[in-house]
Amino acid sequence: MCCHNGITMKIRTASLVELHAFLAVCRSGSMRQAAEQLSVTQGAVSRAVARLEQRVGHALFERSAQGVAPTEKANALRARIQASVDELERVFTSLGRAPAQRGLVRISVVPTLGTRWLVPRLAQFEAQHPRFDVELRQFHHDEDFRRDDVDLWIAIKRPGRRWPRDITGTVLLGREVTAVCTPGIARRLRSVRDLVDHRLLHHTNYPENWRLWLDAAGVDTAGLVLGTGYDLGNNMIVAACAGTGVAVIQPCLVERELASGELVQPFDLAVATGRSYCLCRRKSASGSPAIEAFVRWIGMQAGVGAL
């Protein structure tokens, strides 16, 4: 109840807590993501939405295992209140009363790329965006992109693989492979054909990489025998650094070793495999400032420009 000009009035307006929760769920399509955007618990968002639904007298979201979707009435309500809520935010921001909230970016990335390429660069992102945090989430080889605990994926695009209809993928890097080894091994290689006399380290998921590379180099691969296989690229790199043999791998994964001279490219040849590392995101999701900043930043890091 409130009093205006001596007249007692019943307040019918929903609280800002309820409206912010409602709008956040509309944007993200997930109670959990809305909670993270608002820096509250998922239960707090669910209760706020329930209070609003009770206030308006009908359901505002259709709930399913894939998330929540706004009803027609919810979309109509959002259209009527969004501008007013945004204006209130601008007013209080200009008054200096709005507390600065930290942004969060949740990423699932191919393990070796994450360890060797992304993680060493994250300090740069955090220095440029001190209010944004990055969390690395578990990588799934059979990713269906339905998880609501991930905002962005860096996944492998293979020939014939299509992203789901609601997912967009942008190539970042990793299209080509090249041969690498220690300087000691390189000194014993007078021609590409000498490679077949050395242990050819390979990734067990991509044993064809050596054949692709040697074919491009003009070497007969009939009867080719590969050496030790590794199910993680990171382990193969460690083995190559130890002088176990010669590896064929994406240059982006051995940047540090090539820069320090721990590994070298004995031959100046890079060959496309038909695969690449792609940044994937939902088409329907409205990215937070933190997510959009990260997308722009990683595009620049990969040399493809701001995405």
Image: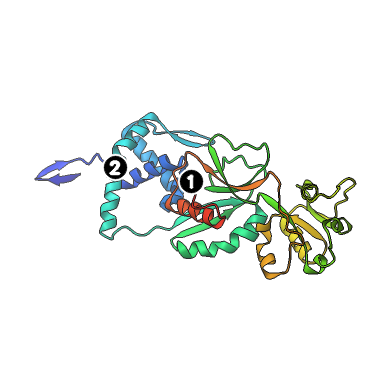
Q: Residues within 10 Å of mark 2 (few under 14, many from 20)?
A: few
Q: Position of residue 216 (x, y in %)?
A: 77, 48
Q: Is residue 11 left or right of residue 32?
A: left
Disc 1 crowd, CA 10 A, few/some/many (<14, 14-19, 20+): many
Q: Is residue 177 left or right of residue 304?
A: right
Under mark 2, the amino acid is Ala
Give 123 or 214, whichever is nearer the viewer. Answer: 214
In this image, 5 relative to 2: left or right?
A: left
Q: Quadrant of residue 70?
A: top left
Q: Amino acid at mark 1?
A: Arg
Residue 270 seen in render: yes
Tell me the quadrant of the picture where the N terminus can be found: top left
Helix, strand or loop at mark 1 = helix
In the image, residue 267 sits, relative to residue 37, either above or below, namely below
Q: Position of residue 270 (x, y in %)?
A: 71, 53
Toward the viewer: 38 or 188? 188
Query: Could you tell me which residue is drawn at 56 percent across and 55 percent down?
Result: 303
In percent of the image, x 29 and y 42: which residue is there? 83
Q: Are marks 2 and 1 in contact (CB under 8 Å)?
A: no
Q: Which mark is residue 106?
A: none
Dividing the picture into quadrants, the one containing residue 95 is bottom left
Between 146 and 20, the one nearer to me in the picture = 146
Observer able to see residue 150: no
Between discs 2 and 1, the one toward the N terminus: 1
Tag 2, which secondary structure?
Answer: helix
Mark number displayed over residue 83: 2
In whole angstroms, how far apart are the C-alphas of marks 2 and 1?
24 Å
The residue pinned by badge 1 equals 32
